[in-house]
């Protein structure tokens, strides 16, 4: 496989993934609506950027011609985004999914990698949530993410390898930064407010570094088809409560920016009960893959990016917060 199409390639994960694909020697096409612009992507002779909407099947079909593999990241992302317009989110995250898969297969794509989410598990007190755990989606976002999985596997064939990844909450620095994800939120507040506000605290949340999940997608292009065909894999690293995450963030920020110490932790109530302990043993055993980076690494990277001036106005600029930005853009 040589030519890769990445939907949502200008997004938070995409802007970390695309350079890794280029470094690995692939020709890359990014297909993205560009709601947040393409500033996170550096021009490259083997990079083609297509501004396109997943709901425009004709445009997608044209863009996917010649691709050997698709990495599907694009979606209206994170749960609160569905407050914007449930019909829009359903159309982007679910309605256009199977037509896009069919168009990819008809175009001769050999491998389709789908980024689902570990939030499909909703709430679980199981000590280890494995891939066969019942899905208990609490929001439209994770409901539609889960509903797409069987639609993809319907089209699995010897010529069309399909695999679903359920990533934990992603954290760490990206050129298209998001500060509406748990570790990133806590770090941003610690640096700028010298206080970490914890909503709830006892909820368990798995996390994974943005570089690790990006490297997994690159790796999946090389894994023998028989190891991944029709398979679902959790991809997480560390499972911590929100309280534990706050303590980690406090420690690392105080190390990186001692002038901010002491940073306080304040707790308040939450209306977000999602809690689950994701088990990633299957991907380690079947694919011999494990993340390399910790939550501490993610926090340290964010501290250094902010100190270097790479993330100006990180508390107030709408582009770092998906819901605020999409409301501002009046997306429809």
Image (cartoon, rainbow, N blue to C red):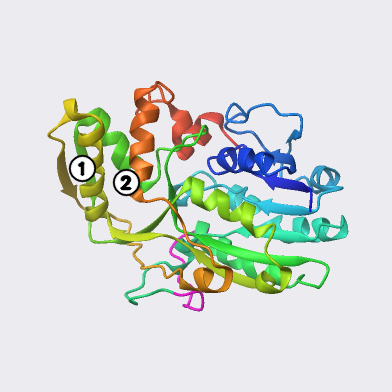
Which mark is drawn over residue 47? none
Residues in magenta, as a range: 130-140
In the rendering, at what x and y percent does residue 42 appear?
63, 27
The quadrant where residue 43 appears: top right
Q: Residue at x 63, y 67 (%)?
A: 149
Q: Which residue is mark 2?
A: 296
Residue 251 tag number = 1
Give 88 or 157, whichever is nearer the viewer. 157
Magenta stretch, overall SS:
loop
Q: Secondary structure at mark 1?
A: helix
Q: Are marks 1 and 2 in contact (CB under 8 Å)?
A: yes
Is residue 131 on the magenta stretch? Answer: yes
Label 2: which secondary element: helix
Instruction: Estimate how packed mark 1 is, as few (under 14), some (14 to 19) or many (20 or more) residues with alpha carbons within 10 Å.
Output: some
As measured in the structure, the alpha-carbon distance from the residue carrying label 1 to the one carrying label 2 is: 9 Å
Decide: few, some or many residues near mark 2? Use Cα within 10 Å; few <14, some 14-19, many ≥20. some
**Closer to the camera in the image, 223 or 84:** 223
């Amino acid at each position: 496989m040589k030519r890769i199409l990445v939907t949502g390639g200008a997004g938070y994960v995409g802007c970390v993934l695309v350079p890794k694909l280029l470094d690995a020697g692939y020709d890359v096409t990014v297909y993205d609506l560009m709601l947040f612009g393409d500033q996170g992507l550096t021009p490259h002779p083997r990079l083609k950027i297509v501004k396109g909407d997943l709901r425009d099947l004709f445009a997608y079909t044209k863009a996917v011609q010649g691709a050997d593999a698709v990495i599907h990241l694009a979606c209206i992302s994170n749960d609160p985004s569905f407050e914007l317009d449930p019909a829009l989110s359903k159309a982007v995250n679910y309605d256009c999914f199977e037509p896009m898969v069919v168009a990819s297969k008809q175009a001769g794509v050999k491998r389709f990698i789908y980024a689902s989410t570990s939030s499909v598990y909703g709430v679980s007190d199981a000590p280890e949530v494995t891939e066969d755990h019942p899905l208990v989606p609490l929001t439209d976002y994770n409901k539609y993410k889960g509903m797409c999985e069987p639609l993809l596997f319907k089209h699995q064939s010897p010529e069309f390898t399909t695999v679903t990844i359920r990533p934990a909450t992603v954290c760490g620095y990206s050129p298209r930064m998001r500060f509406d994800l748990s570790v990133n939120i806590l770090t941003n507040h610690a640096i700028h407010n010298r206080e970490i506000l914890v909503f709830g605290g006892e909820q368990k949340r798995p996390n994974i570094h943005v570089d690790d999940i990006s490297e997994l997608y690159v790796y999946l292009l090389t894994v023998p088809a028989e190891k991944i065909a029709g398979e679902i894999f959790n991809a997480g690293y560390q499972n911590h409560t929100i309280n534990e995450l706050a303590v980690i963030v406090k420690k690392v920020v105080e190390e990186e920016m001692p002038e901010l110490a002491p940073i306080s932790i304040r707790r308040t109530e939450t209306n977000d009960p999602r809690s689950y302990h994701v088990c990633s043993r299957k991907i380690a055993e079947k694919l011999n893959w494990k993340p390399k980076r910790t939550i501490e690494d993610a926090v340290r990277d964010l501290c250094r990016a902010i100190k270097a001036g790479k993330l100006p106005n990180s508390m107030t600029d709408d582009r770092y917060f998906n819901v605020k930005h999409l409301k501002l853009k009046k997306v429809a």
